């Protein structure tokens, strides 16, 4: 399995600071003046809890060790992940796997990278969209992103898991809602010098890297770059249609460290 946590040019810690145009968020403020984002935090808690209880974490002694644990992990991924070759069969259970796969992660790195990114960009996007709309947006775009990948790889027997498609949709929506967000990146090929760019520069660059990587990706285990691209496009289009009539982005400024999301195919 390939544990590619971060995309090459964005694989270090970033800081996001939003400076959008005037607008209002739909979620209520807490007693401390900060908006609550229960959907984002609930998704993070749920994904972490399911991972810890699953054989993928390697913490539950009931799944054994060594080859026994590996067998349990493979069975777990095949049961709850998306298997493209089986998805379009006349099986109601298979049709649900793009939804269940959003809550399954293949490794600690895979989980922590996705959840940290969801915490930062998801919270801000939830503030702008509102709780119910963000929940439906996350699940719907995540489902369609995995469905799009499966459709393009209809003969693959590899299981696909992870929330990366949904989180990529959050990135796409974030790009439209907060195009002037300042993203500070430590680029390895520039000796990790901190450079600040607006979101409209960084996120399209990230999407371009996913496009290039998707063209070189094979059918074996690895990162599902195409799911990232589908999710990113869906998120941007949704935000454009829903909020593109002069509603603007939230003007509040906040600074939080984040890491990059990656989808992952499992053997």
Image (cartoon, helix red, strand yellow):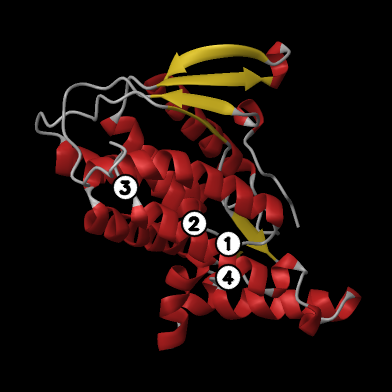
Is 35 placed above or below 87 here? above
Tell me the SS state at disc 4: helix
Quadrant for the C terminus in the image: bottom right
Residue 227 rendering spot, x and y as whole percentages: 48, 52
- Residue that carries the numbered disc 4 in the rendered image: 50
Q: Looking at the image, is mark 4 or mark 2 earlier in the sequence? A: 2
Q: Mark 1 and 4 residues: CB-CB less than 8 Å, in contact?
A: yes
Tell me the SS state at disc 3: loop
Residue 138, by quadrant, is bottom left
Task: Give the crowd class for mark 1: few <14, some 14-19, many >=20 residues within 10 Å.
Answer: many
Q: Nearer the viewer, residue 69 or 98?
A: 69
Q: CA distance from mark 4 to mark 2?
A: 10 Å
Q: Please name the residue shown 69% across and 45% down the image.
A: 4
For the question of whether residue 88 can be seen, the reply is no
| Marking on residue 48 | 1
Farthest residue, direction right: 66
Residue 167 rendering spot, x and y as whole percentages: 45, 48
Residue 6 rendering spot, x and y as whole percentages: 64, 38
Q: Mark 1 and 3 residues: CB-CB less than 8 Å, in contact?
A: no
Q: Looking at the image, is mark 3 or mark 2 earlier in the sequence? A: 3
- Residue that carries the numbered disc 3 in the rendered image: 36
Tell me the SS state at disc 2: helix
Q: CA distance from mark 2 to mark 1?
A: 6 Å
Is label 3 or label 4 in front?
A: 3
Task: Give the crowd class for mark 3: few <14, some 14-19, many >=20 residues within 10 Å.
Answer: some
- Residue that carries the numbered disc 2 in the rendered image: 44
Farthest residue, direction left: 245
Tell me the SS state at disc 1: helix
Farthest residue, direction front: 31
Is 201 placed above or below 56 here? above
Residue 258, by quadrant, is top right
Residue 24 rendering spot, x and y as whole percentages: 16, 34
């Amino acid at each position: 399995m390939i544990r590619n946590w971060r995309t090459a040019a964005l694989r270090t810690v970033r800081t996001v600071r939003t400076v959008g145009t005037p607008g209002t968020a739909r979620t209520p403020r807490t007693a401390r003046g900060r908006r609550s984002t229960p959907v984002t935090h609930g998704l993070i808690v749920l994904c972490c809890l399911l991972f810890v209880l699953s054989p993928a974490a390697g913490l539950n002694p009931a799944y054994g060790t060594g080859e026994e644990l590996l067998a349990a992990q493979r069975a777990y991924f095949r049961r709850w992940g998306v298997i493209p070759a089986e998805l379009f069969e006349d099986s109601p259970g298979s049709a649900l796997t793009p939804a269940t796969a959003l809550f399954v992660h293949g490794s600690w790195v895979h989980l922590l990278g996705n959840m940290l990114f969801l915490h930062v960009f998801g919270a801000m996007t939830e503030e702008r969209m509102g709780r119910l709309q963000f929940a439906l947006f996350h699940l719907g775009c995540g489902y369609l992103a995995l469905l799009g990948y499966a459709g393009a790889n209809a003969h693959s027997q590899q299981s696909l898991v992870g929330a990366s498609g949904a989180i990529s949709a959050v990135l796409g929506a974030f790009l439209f809602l907060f195009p002037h967000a300042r993203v500070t990146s430590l680029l390895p090929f520039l000796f990790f010098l901190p450079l600040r760019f607006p979101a409209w520069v960084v996120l399209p660059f990230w999407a371009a890297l996913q496009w290039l990587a998707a063209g070189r990706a094979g059918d074996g285990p690895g990162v599902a770059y195409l799911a990232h691209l589908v999710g990113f496009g869906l998120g941007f289009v949704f935000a454009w249609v829903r909020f593109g009539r002069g509603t603007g982005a939230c003007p509040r400024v906040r600074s939080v460290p984040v890491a990059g999301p990656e989808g992952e195919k499992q053997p």
